[in-house]
Amino acid sequence: MEYKNDRVSGINIAYIGGGSRNWAWSLMSDLALEEQLSGNVKLYDIDFEAALLNEKIGNRLLSRDDVKGKWAYKAVKTMAEALEGADFVVISILPGTFREMASDVHLPEEYGIYQSVGDTVGPAGLVRALRTVPMFAEIAEAIKKYAPKAWVINYTNPMTICTRTLYEVFPDIKAIGSCHEVFSTQELLAAMLKEMKGIEVASRDDIKVNVLGINHFTWVTRASYKHIDLMELFKDFASKYYETGFIPNKEEYDAASYFRCSHRVKFDLYKRYGILAASGDRHLAEFLPPWYLKDPETADKWGFGLTPVSYRIERKKALDEKCKRIVNGEEEFVLRDSGEEAVREFKALLGLGDFVTNTNIPNRGQVEGLPHGAIVETNALFSFDSVSPVFAGKLPFDVQSIIATHVANQETIIKAALNKDKELAFRAFVNDPLVTIDIDKARELFERMLKNTKEYLPGWDI
Amino acid sequence: MEYKNDRVSGINIAYIGGGSRNWAWSLMSDLALEEQLSGNVKLYDIDFEAALLNEKIGNRLLSRDDVKGKWAYKAVKTMAEALEGADFVVISILPGTFREMASDVHLPEEYGIYQSVGDTVGPAGLVRALRTVPMFAEIAEAIKKYAPKAWVINYTNPMTICTRTLYEVFPDIKAIGSCHEVFSTQELLAAMLKEMKGIEVASRDDIKVNVLGINHFTWVTRASYKHIDLMELFKDFASKYYETGFIPNKEEYDAASYFRCSHRVKFDLYKRYGILAASGDRHLAEFLPPWYLKDPETADKWGFGLTPVSYRIERKKALDEKCKRIVNGEEEFVLRDSGEEAVREFKALLGLGDFVTNTNIPNRGQVEGLPHGAIVETNALFSFDSVSPVFAGKLPFDVQSIIATHVANQETIIKAALNKDKELAFRAFVNDPLVTIDIDKARELFERMLKNTKEYLPGWDI
Amino acid sequence: MEYKNDRVSGINIAYIGGGSRNWAWSLMSDLALEEQLSGNVKLYDIDFEAALLNEKIGNRLLSRDDVKGKWAYKAVKTMAEALEGADFVVISILPGTFREMASDVHLPEEYGIYQSVGDTVGPAGLVRALRTVPMFAEIAEAIKKYAPKAWVINYTNPMTICTRTLYEVFPDIKAIGSCHEVFSTQELLAAMLKEMKGIEVASRDDIKVNVLGINHFTWVTRASYKHIDLMELFKDFASKYYETGFIPNKEEYDAASYFRCSHRVKFDLYKRYGILAASGDRHLAEFLPPWYLKDPETADKWGFGLTPVSYRIERKKALDEKCKRIVNGEEEFVLRDSGEEAVREFKALLGLGDFVTNTNIPNRGQVEGLPHGAIVETNALFSFDSVSPVFAGKLPFDVQSIIATHVANQETIIKAALNKDKELAFRAFVNDPLVTIDIDKARELFERMLKNTKEYLPGWDI
Amino acid sequence: MEYKNDRVSGINIAYIGGGSRNWAWSLMSDLALEEQLSGNVKLYDIDFEAALLNEKIGNRLLSRDDVKGKWAYKAVKTMAEALEGADFVVISILPGTFREMASDVHLPEEYGIYQSVGDTVGPAGLVRALRTVPMFAEIAEAIKKYAPKAWVINYTNPMTICTRTLYEVFPDIKAIGSCHEVFSTQELLAAMLKEMKGIEVASRDDIKVNVLGINHFTWVTRASYKHIDLMELFKDFASKYYETGFIPNKEEYDAASYFRCSHRVKFDLYKRYGILAASGDRHLAEFLPPWYLKDPETADKWGFGLTPVSYRIERKKALDEKCKRIVNGEEEFVLRDSGEEAVREFKALLGLGDFVTNTNIPNRGQVEGLPHGAIVETNALFSFDSVSPVFAGKLPFDVQSIIATHVANQETIIKAALNKDKELAFRAFVNDPLVTIDIDKARELFERMLKNTKEYLPGWDI
């Protein structure tokens, strides 16, 4: 790397899952819009062809006038090649295919267990984790070997388990987990300010939040805009929209369908616990006993959608086609600020300016009352070659109980996955709050789910 | 006190709840059978007449030939009188009357919540605790004032909450909570040894157990008889009797009815968690989601009884009559080893011989993973003027999650009770695993239960 | 308070020790230079006349054209008056007079114990603390009563003990301890950059440091300027100037005399521990066994001065005269940025912009390995109505051992002071690393020192 | 192993250091006197001949009438042979020869550092540890491989570091460190009871002590005989004999010379800290700044001896000759209760009866305020296949500070030894309280000491 006039050139980024249409494109766009950085991106993907297409898309940007950051993209065939010399590693992979994901999400429905997303907790999150942990163990080993000093940003779900696996396998890794759910919460608070007070917020950065918890089940205990206490305001807001939900744009809401969220779950949780859950309702509902996910009607009543895997398949297909068109030059790759923060984080880690944002890293006490070492989400100070958590305090006793159960489950799932220990995995399975069915039925479902994902569980006794 | 030839005379015991027919009589009997100790017992009860009857029964023993330990009993009208000069304080009170208890246990049934005992957790345990905490706060203040150096043994339920309140109000108190549930488990293991191996165990003391958890939800992670590993044996035992339950004496079992216990819950928990729950099934079932307490039929299927308060009323009546007969000399007070350990504990604390037994005291780390200060049950070394916990280790992650939730609830209930904070109490109420009904129904039940116990909640906004 | 266009008016500041010539004048100057804030400052001092003079000086500023921040000053006769309605409280008092301080610093010299400052640790720090703790206990009680929600900034030494006393007496206080020693270290690093690399640093803010430890014995484990690792550079720097010390301006250094510092102690500590001590050498030397303070010659050899109290008396006299001249209009009060951060902190706490700086607050885990609750110095995020520590990590084992001993001593001194417990205070006295004399001599010195400060230890058995 | 009528036969013991004349003979004697146990002892020693002599001595016992426990002894040539099939492992080795020990103890004298024992802390303890740690690492690896379920009893010094190394290398090891220093303290308390009260104590077991700290620097915070508080009595005792020391038998004391101990150090420490140091004065003095070890005269004034290595050499020679005589049948091996507790511990671990005694095991909270995992000495409950620490509480702040420094040093020494990290070892060296000389002198001494022990530090850069 070379520093000159507050610009850094020659940066090497390794992208694991470099065939991705989603996160990879976001990063390409953000890099292109940032003038202080330039360098090389190596794209590694088990689907090499996909990486190759992204290489083409990426390199095509070099010649465009509206591109400020100049990056050379290269698809590579091994993780080693991608990692060697890397200053940053980005991980966004899909563990398994949508076939496995369909089993994760929909088979439990036969047993009366409904899941709105299915990538974090619940039976789906657990089985997905069993597939993912060995992949992340492999990635961690490779980073230890080829790029031990690189900063690693993970986007893959289940976020907490993936990031925790990196630290379990390579304790000295410099890894963080990044997720935009809290950003949406800041935007919700900005919308609330407009709705309730007529105040326009210039940027979501101006909404200051103290976040703590675990990814997708993160909570806000303090929020302010300048000198305005937003938690006080949220009380009125939650009460005003408790019955109807907060739906500023009905058309958009209806169109969103599988992703729709009226914040009614958030309002109900505020009523119960007095603090603000900082994630989409679809995620929140999955961490709790089946209060909001008893059945599709209940979810509908609470104003949020269940996302079927069939939809994800369709969407993937659309993206694949879009990809082809871009590669063929039939469509232009549109640059836009993705809203993700990886590039901003790169800059701080390179010494180009400190900033504070939320991130997922091991608990060193930033969340009081949760185990040390567990991956928690709080604010952290990003500075030159360092990410230091900001102390976030303690959760209310009841929220903490629920989170502690999930943390214990997550630790157990990782241990089970690393040791291919089916009985241990089952212990975590029946300990999930969504699993309220009797133990024999649970056993049957568990065995069937494992069978469906068997291909990704080599060495397991299934 | 005077020490002479390993005998101690002039010991002063304060008995709070000294009108009790149950625990008081047990203590009288045990004291009478122990030749190394003698002195005075002051009986304090809000029902002074009841204490007076016990005074008569106690003093009548003085003249009997079969009585080795000589004690003078005296009913007193104030707690101060009882405590002044006390070396030991025994507490066994009934917080409220059976009228309140009937509401605690049976009103939730209207909402589909069944409770087999109703004195520890669940809606009944919580409301009972709200009544009890202020009484224990008052007792703790009095001990601090009149007998700060006395050793205090509590028998009252909810054991954990009562004992914790003593320490909350008077942190330097020397208090323990005593309970016989673990002894029964030792007896069950002895019965198992006989059943499975034909070995007769001379005394339950020979069954060594490593216990840990919270009262009535205590667990055994190691058990041995001489060199025999009883946990290994229990695996076979649990499997052999999983379907039928272990009922050595069918007649006794049927007669027990409301108190019956076939250990099927214990066997099922062993299947889930691989360790032994060291309490009666009626207690165990109440700590969990309604797996075993969905309805009376489910409880019956699992081989344990629900104890109606009507039965307790009848039994009380019978004891009252028995009491009268004894006072009138129509019936003799029968001396028998009660199986309780208070007297043995007195002796160790007086320097007459160390021993190790299970007890309820603040966690100083003896149970890893549970909060410091929470009242936990483990073994402890009783020695001259000291009770030192023995390190018991860590519970499996899933059992620990459940206990941690109850510990958090118990701390919350105490805080709510001391501050008369209804909203906080409600938070604990809906956080109890037995409460799976929706939040509005829960609110209604809670309010009705509080109204029924209103008399014992002065200063509350009900 | 009123917010308008990012300006806040009507702020109330209570200044305890408002007759100060030093800190009070700095604050006046900084407030005058800040255009976003305005309001009232109440000056409370046990020397009311001194406060009155400051009132005059302060109010005279109102009419000056170069003053951007408009503040009304008022001397008040009681702490209550000062505190009522206060949004901020600033504390800078002198505990006792220079007569007591002379005994603190110089009497130990008769016993071979030399102290370069005498306000933090060592015999002088301890005895000063015994005087100060009751004053801070009184202040804490008053804040609890009159301004429980105010933010409190303490400048008084011994910083750690003063701030800890505030929290001991009023656990919910929102107090921080502010000290500029770390700023000087940032300036030293900037000077080093110039010296070693020819780089001019625009502002000390651009020197990023990870600080941790206790006040006046704070350490830097990471330091950077943009992407330059300053810890690496410091290694060469320390080695280059190890023998001579780093004295950029010989004249200034010689003139400083009693305050001079060549950083040789810092260089030696770097050699021992591999990290950077972030305080003046005069302070650092006092925390250690008498390696650098064996006698005045040793101190001189290590290139730092001992500050005699006679000098402080002279300086005070000069300031008193200056004060008179200003009040009489014979001299103008010169506005200059004091380098202190109180005003910047006010702004962040008022919601006018977050920033990160070092501060002294209770350890909630930000320094691993030191006790929770101890007052530690690390970076913290200042935001609207909140100060959240940034995690700073762990000290090397040997530095941690030394600090842990001082932390234990500080806790003990506070307990001794609050309970007027002479024996406990003596335990801390002989446990100080500077006290290597034998125990009988130590006892004699201790008793003599207490006698000399007797007037400020009412109720003690001296 | 076979259990029959409360006797166990077929027990396998591996003795590492089986050529020892000291500990091995004690064990042989104790085994011979115990009728409930029998089996085989494998003797492994790097000096095979020495082990062979012990084999002969041991087997000769088989035919004697006064021998109740029958054991077959066998010298073996590899650790593997000794360990395979072992139920118990005993370790008592001499790390290096007396030549190295002479350098450890006496070279520092040239620099003004005196050491009374030289096997635990100080420069001698540190260098001895550097030799020993790799040996214990090797032993731990072998136990992990050949006897992972065996109970391991270590007698080797530095006790804490040796035992900690076992756990560092094989965390699941079942190892304890055994030491008789606390037993001597119990005997001192018994002697005190006789002296002060005329009470004869039947057995040191009747003296109940609450011990806590680290080996050779263990402290007693509670002590009782029946109902008598011995700590109260010790106050008078320490005061009565403060000046003269307590020397019940002047002749014996004079004869002991190099090992003599008048308990004056203990009395002085009681004066400082109010608790009882439970070790010989020669050991205690080495943990502190050179208060008692300034020079030989100071030690003499405090009534304890410095043990020269020349004496150890002589004593070894005498034992070697005695050994020959016994092997040749010229002298009979005398059976006597050694006062050590290994055999008693074997019995408890085999299920033949629980008991409580002091032992050295990892801290799991039994000593509050010291790091988890550090090897601490407290009471523990020995039961079937388990050793569970009894909670011992917290040390006074000043004693804790000293111990914490040593614990940090010990952890550092182990890390340095395992990584052959000379600089780290030097950090621990200069952090020892006995090392008050300046850093260049310290460096010189350190280098010379390492050179003298070079043969045992393969792979080090010396």
Image (cartoon, coloured by chain):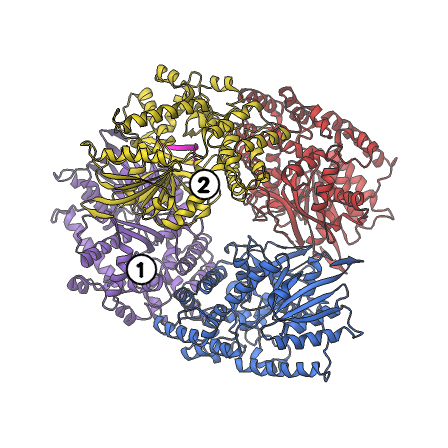
Chain colours: A red, B yellow, C blue, D purple
Q: Quadrant of residue B189?
A: top left
Secondary structure beneath dot 1 equals helix
**In this figure, which residue is indicated by the disc labeled 2?**
B135
Q: Position of residue A398 (x, y in %)?
A: 58, 38
Residue C286 in magenta stretch: no
- Residue D385, placed above or below residue D192: above
The amino acid on which the numbered mark 1 sits, given as a three-letter code, is His
Q: Residue at x 33, y 70 (%)?
A: D294
The amino acid on which the numbered mark 2 sits, given as a three-letter code, is Met
Residue B219 in magenta stretch: yes
Q: Position of residue D261 (x, y in %)?
A: 24, 62
- Quadrant (top left, top right, bottom left, bottom right) of the C terminus of chain C: bottom left
Mark 2 falls within which chain? B
Which label sits on residue D283?
A: 1
Looking at this rendering, what residue extends furthest in the top direction?
B251
Q: Residue at x 63, y 51 (%)?
A: A390
Q: Residues within 10 Å of mark 2 (few under 14, many from 20)?
A: some
User: Overall secondary structure of the magenta stretch?
Assistant: strand
Which label sits on residue B151?
A: none
* Apparent side of residue D391 relative to residue C142 in the rendered image (left or right): left
Q: Position of residue B54 (x, y in %)?
A: 31, 34
Closer to us: B344 or A187: B344
- Quadrant (top left, top right, bottom left, bottom right) of the N terminus of chain C: bottom right
Mark 1 falls within which chain? D
Secondary structure beneath dot 2 equals helix
Q: Range of the magenta residues?
A: B213-223
